[in-house]
Amino acid sequence: MVAQYSLGFLLYRGSESIPKDYVQAVHWYRRAAEQGLASAQSSLGWMYRNGKGVPKDYVQAVHWWRKAAEQGNRTAQDGLGWAYFHGESVPKDDVQAVHWYRKSAEQGYARAQRTLGVLYGKGKGVPKDYVQAVHWYRKAAEQGDAVAQTMLGSAYHFGDGVAKDDMQAVHWWRKSAEQGDASAQSNLGWMYRNGKSVVKDDVQAVHWYRKAAEQGNANAQSGLGFMYSEGKGVPKDYVQAMHWWRKAAEQGDASAQSSLGWMYHNGKGVPKNYVQAMHWYRKAAEQGNANAQSKIGLMYYAGTGVPKNYIDAYKWISLAVAKWPSMEDAKGYELVRGILDRLEKQMTLEQIAEAQKQAAQWLQAHQNTADQ
């Protein structure tokens, strides 16, 4: 039966002398699995899980995974953990997911170690415990698991479960980025852009942003748009800035949506278009982006592309002031705060009360957004 499994594996992988053939791979996996070989049972389960050589069938996947998992096969235990976590052909059960992921992780299976770390980080099936999350991320990361390396880097960056240490964050993000992980590449780009535990280097920032952006990472696309708009690490190019910001904005990135609104507002890289400016500002503002909220308020205050409306202006500017992104941007804050002060002198008490009421209603309706 080991020979049958080996033949199935050769047909699954293919080679110069043996064409890849999933149907035949399933045939030989099944013959070995029916004789009780755990590795064949696990592989057959994954074929059913992924619909390779057989129609996708989670019931059959779990059937074969369970047979193998009960014999101690770590890849089948990982699969069974996945099934319980997602509720595929078994009732969703985070505790059972943790049970099977732990069995696999304790045998050194990197993917299960990383997933167990995620479950500890989110408090799914176990009490939330960032120290345990880091413990399992590290085990997987040290085996070269790129996603775990990214997560470990983030733990060091934010100080979750370990002492905050951006040098360690860069270390792990670089390992992951060099394996092609887009999130790590984007993070590394941000570190170079801001000179965090690396020498500030706009060219390196662009390098890593671009690698991630070309994989569709919205944060990196937004960052690359910024670099083009400012001419940092690349020649200033508003058309390219628009290109990357649009890609990020269409994925829901609030910063890119706000930037895209600014480009339309000011006619940079595109013809000036106040309707489009308001469209993108509003998308960002609804996600709680203070810059976009302030821009909407200013458009209502000046009557730019919309009828002048002090109540709407006050509503949006007050929301922005309450959540200004950084006091490092004191100039921007003072400008917006000054407009709010000016509005208060131009409005009646009744108008101010109405604007404050609308702002409170917005906050109530967007409570999760406002808390971010």
Image (cartoon, rainbow, N blue to C red):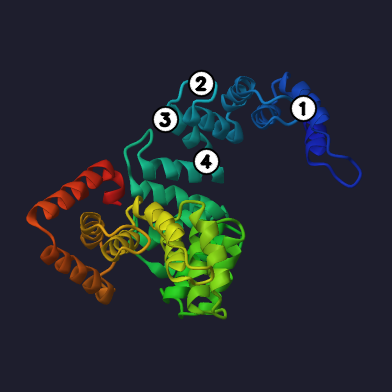
Total number of numbered discs in the rendering: 4
Q: Which is nearer the eye, 336 or 218? A: 336
Q: Residues within 10 Å of mark 1 (few under 14, many from 20)?
A: many
Q: Is 335 positioned to the left or the right of 112 in the image?
A: left
The circle drawn on residue 94 is 3
Q: Which residue is at a point 57% across and 64% down the rendered structure image? A: 243
Q: Is residue 109 above or below residue 90?
A: below
- Identify the residue position indicated by label 1 in the image: 26
Residue 74 point in image, percent of width and height: 58, 35
Quadrant holding the N terminus? top right
The circle drawn on residue 217 is none
Q: Is 64 positioned to the left or the right of 232 in the image?
A: right
Q: Is residue 267 above or below residue 75?
A: below
Task: Indicate the amino acid at tag 4.
Answer: Ala
- Identify the residue position indicated by label 4 in the image: 112
Marks 3 and 1 sit apart, C-alpha to C-alpha, by 30 Å
